[in-house]
Image (cartoon, helix red, strand yellow):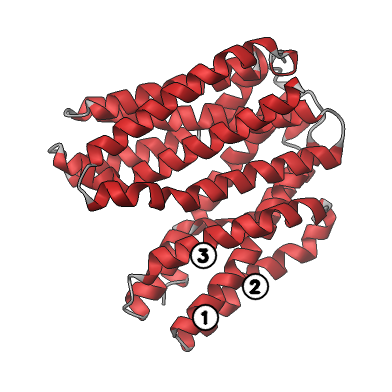
Amino acid sequence: MQSTNLESLLLWRRFISTMSYFALQSVFFVYLQQKGLSNAQITFSLSVLFFCSQAMAIVAGVLGDRFGLAKIMLLGCFLDVLAYFLLLNADHYAVLLLATACFGLGNCFFGTNARACLLALAGEEYALKTRLQGKYLKVTSLSSMCAPLLAIPFIRFEQLNALIWLCFILEIGLFALMVKPFSMLNAVNQTVRFRWAQVLEIINKPFVALHLLLFIPLSIASSFFVIFPYLFDNKLHLPELVPVALFGNGLLTVLLQGPFSKHINLRVRQLIWISPLLALGMIVPWFITLTFPSIYSGMLYLVIFTVLEVYALTAIANLLVRFDNGKNRGFIFGASKLLQSSLTMLVMNLIPIYFLV
């Protein structure tokens, strides 16, 4: 029962915190411009946030294994609280940089170790592990989809500061709720000392092959905020459809995540022929859509894109669960996130050259 309660607490924390995070992202530029910061300063601070949330994942995994998953998740929660406090007082550029670094590290420390924690709670049962990972991905998608709904009234009535205060209060409450249960559960307090041999245990040929095979569909999926604004704004001159596409993507993801997590059970060797199909399934319909641009072709491509996106994300999540041997809990997700972000950066910089024509 205690394990079930912790699972629910983790998922609820992920849902509320992610919704707050994406609501903040929707007002980030305007809020900081109102504080007198320049566009260049705001843009660079965002790059600091993304760097800390992606590149530091492997550090988050190592720390979680070494000092206990619960301690590092709590540290991530505390950093989120600190980030909102600093953002409320971000009248100076140095404070803003510190705030965005705390946001990135907080998200990274909690997210990386929360996924490892769910594996620890599942024990040795593979089906339960994949079910919990599916729930985690579904909750993340649902919260990002609901975030604009939270931000809209604050934007409408020009109360951006009140939105930041609301997010700050929510994070304080979540942090307070997690302290006691996290300190009592042995499954998330066991430590695993980092060994350099661990790198070779995890970053082996199947692990690298998995990421190399899936990096094109995953990277295209990560380019959603480039591809669909280009289609609906530049090609169709209907920018109001961009948030509709975002909502549709989130809704379909939530509906598909559960069944996909339950039924997608691949091996790396199967990806040799599945991965090219996923990549072609994202690329070919895109150029057909550009040839015959319309609202209908755009929405049809959105459905195709989302189905293949969820398939690729679920495939890599379930294979990481299969690779886990119980000794490298946080490190495996940290290493995966670092490798994914590196490959995604490569492809995303090619998207404007070869994809947006």
Nearer to us in this view, 281 or 206? 281
- Dot 1 or dot 3, earlier in sequence: 3
Q: CA distance from mark 2 to mark 3?
A: 19 Å
- Spot the residue most to the right: 125
Q: CA distance from mark 1 to mark 3?
A: 21 Å
Image position, residue 71 (x, y; %) = 58, 15
Please tell me the numbered disc located at residue 93. none
- Residue contact at pointers 2 and 3, CB within 8 angstroms: no
Q: CA distance from mark 1 to mark 2?
A: 11 Å
Q: Amino acid at mark 1?
A: Phe
Please tell me the numbered disc located at residue 248. 3
Residue found at x 76% / y 43%: 131
Taking 340 as reference, is 157 left or right? left
Residue occupied by mark 2: 281
Taking 293 as reference, is 142 left or right? right
Image: 28 above or below 256: above
Residue occupied by mark 1: 287
| Residue 352 visible in rendering | no
Nearer to us in this view, 352 or 120? 120
Residue found at x 41% / y 77%: 357
Q: Residues within 10 Å of mark 1 (few under 14, many from 20)?
A: some
